[in-house]
Amino acid sequence: MRKGELTRERIIAQAAPIFNTRGFAGCSMQDVMEATGLEKGGLYRHFGSKEELAAEAFKYALAGSKRLRTDKVDRTHGAVDELLAVVRRWVEAPAAVAGGCPLMNTAVDADDGNVLLRKLARKGFADWRERLCEIVRAGVERGEIRKKTDPRRIANTVIAMLEGALMMSRLEKSSMAMEDARASLEELIERIRT
Amino acid sequence: MRKGELTRERIIAQAAPIFNTRGFAGCSMQDVMEATGLEKGGLYRHFGSKEELAAEAFKYALAGSKRLRTDKVDRTHGAVDELLAVVRRWVEAPAAVAGGCPLMNTAVDADDGNVLLRKLARKGFADWRERLCEIVRAGVERGEIRKKTDPRRIANTVIAMLEGALMMSRLEKSSMAMEDARASLEELIERIRT
């Protein structure tokens, strides 16, 4: 990697927790300059605008969280156990970058605002939903999950509950909401097992 | 009400959707001045700081949402149907002030930030959880809900799922996630019926 690219990568990695913690409006280019030790000119050489940097920071944070949530998830015991493992993993390690789930933060931050960030967050949720749907569909095909199960309902239920519970747990600085959400998701997921 | 109090109330009502939509960092006193048509001096006569105004705007938005979510909910068919009515009401009318649920917005906005707003959001969730727990406890006492039901788990599950689904539905501009969350909550709630 060339030096310019390395600097660019370093800026993104250092900006990601700031944007994820403070939100788009709450993070200024001045904040990023202070965190990276770069001058204004140095920063704008790599990113044309705050929006461009925020988008790269979001992608970086999301990729980290995705790795954390899917790496080494046990896929050897069938689809139902894979769904349970996804839930367990989230409860144990919800986010890779300081500030919580980048998807939720960006969704709430950008639902009435920044168009590019909203588009990226929508794609993030759509991809996640599709991955979960795929687990359910494969489970139905292999006879591990009941035929009448709606993959989309399971996927949306898992995502909504985990995101909502993370939001509460972070606010309350307590794992209570996460543990309760996990118990309810386990109950729902066990019921689709054949 | 005196004129000064009326002005104060009007400022709060006009600031609430701005703070709820843009977040604390994304809403300036300048924005509020423009929305209210007041000069800086006029605004600061009523509120000592942006934080004070944001706190009042949050309380106003939360009170509106609470009214919307609890007014005329049918309590005549027992605890299980009351829980189902709470879910249905949320799906049909999730928030009273533009920008979505003030609790979630403030939670995500303030989880790493503003201490006063975080405290108010925590209290908002605690109150909501307690209201739901009370419905479950009354249902157990009247023999409508299974004895082994954990009121807190039901309450946290309902709140996490509704908040998470609202976040997704707002981002996707689609009721899909809300409808799926509703179906899953109905399944879980029906299972605690005696």
Image (cartoon, coloured by chain):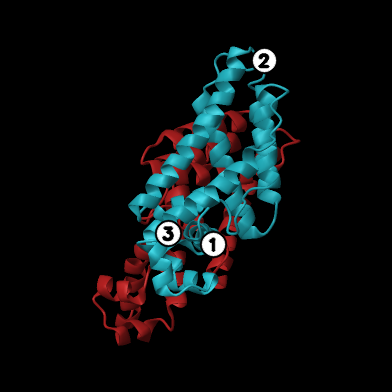
Chain colours: A cyan, B red
Q: Which residue is mark 3?
A: A53
**Chain-order first, disc 3 or disc 2:** 3
Chain under disc 1 = A
Q: CA distance from mark 3 to mark 2?
A: 47 Å
Label 1 belongs to which residue? A21
Q: CA distance from mark 1 to mark 2?
A: 42 Å
Q: Secondary structure at mark 2?
A: loop
Q: Position of residue B42 (x, y in %)?
A: 30, 84
- Where does label 2 land, which residue? A194
| Left or right of residue A76: residue B46 | left
Residue A139 circle label: none
Left or right, residue A16 beside residue B129: left
Circle 1: residue type:
Thr
Instruction: Give the camera-side residue of A186 and B8.
Output: A186
Q: x, y percentage for residue A126?
A: 45, 36
**Is label 3 in a helix, a strand or a loop?**
helix
